[in-house]
Image (tube, helix red, strand yellow):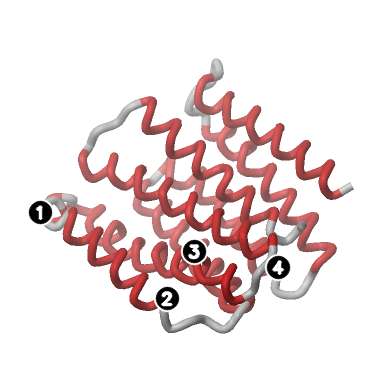
Amino acid sequence: MKLFLAVVLFLLMEGGLYLYLDGPKRGDLRCKALTTLMPVLLGLYGTVHRGGESWVLFAALCVCLVSDVLIGVHFVAGVFSFLAAHVLLIVHLLLQAQPTPWSIPLWALLYLLLFAYYRKTIPTLGEKRVPLCVYPVFLFGMLSLAAALPFLRPGVSSACLALGALCFTVSDLILADGVVTQRESSRRDHAVMHLYEPAVYLLALSVVL
């Protein structure tokens, strides 16, 4: 039953993604929200059956759904909403396994590399400067914890969390690069969404398998 549901919701998610990116109502936030709703429903199914700390992950998925719409209305508010989702994901990851000290150097390295790459552009970002500087702190914190999880707690669930966190991070970095460089393209939009939606799906799948 759970595998059948996972496949059906994945196909519905892909259908919604097509409508949002290439359909007659391309860019409609309602299509975007309905697309993310599919992994949220999968997460709800897994959370109801598993219980416990899974509710923290489900809360993060719900915040992602809200953030999808909010970032299309007001960018800064959307960024901080997604930041809240990452805080919840960090809490969930901390509940899965005792964090390893190696996560700290990885987090610091990722942030320093990003800061060094955009150091000349950051002062020109205006009101977007603060959220774009603060957000990676939590984004890379989430990724660093998730990357260690398959080694600390081997299993399919941990692998889903790690891969989901990686896809989420890459998607956000591509999106942020478009904002910083002010270069928008259909190809970039497709890359962002085709990484983000599977990321949310993988996070939800981690409480099902």
Disc nearer the start of the sequence (1/4): 4
**Number of the label disc, if any, that sits on residue 86:** 3
The answer to whether residue 205 is left or right of residue 140 is: right
Q: Position of residue 150 (x, y in %)?
A: 59, 68
Give the labeled residue for mark 2. 103
| Three-letter amino acid code of the residue under disc 1 | Lys
Front residue of this view, candidates 161 and 62 = 161
Disc nearer the start of the sequence (4/2): 4
Q: CA distance from mark 2 to mark 1?
A: 28 Å
Give the labeled residue for mark 1. 120
Front residue of this view, candidates 149 and 11 = 149
The 10 Å Cα crowd at callout 2, few under 14, some 14 to 19, many 20 or more, is some
The answer to whether residue 9 is left or right of residue 119 is: right
Disc nearer the start of the sequence (3/4): 4
Disc nearer the start of the sequence (2/1): 2
Classify residue 154 by image quadrant: bottom right
* Residue at 35%, 43% in the rendered image: 174
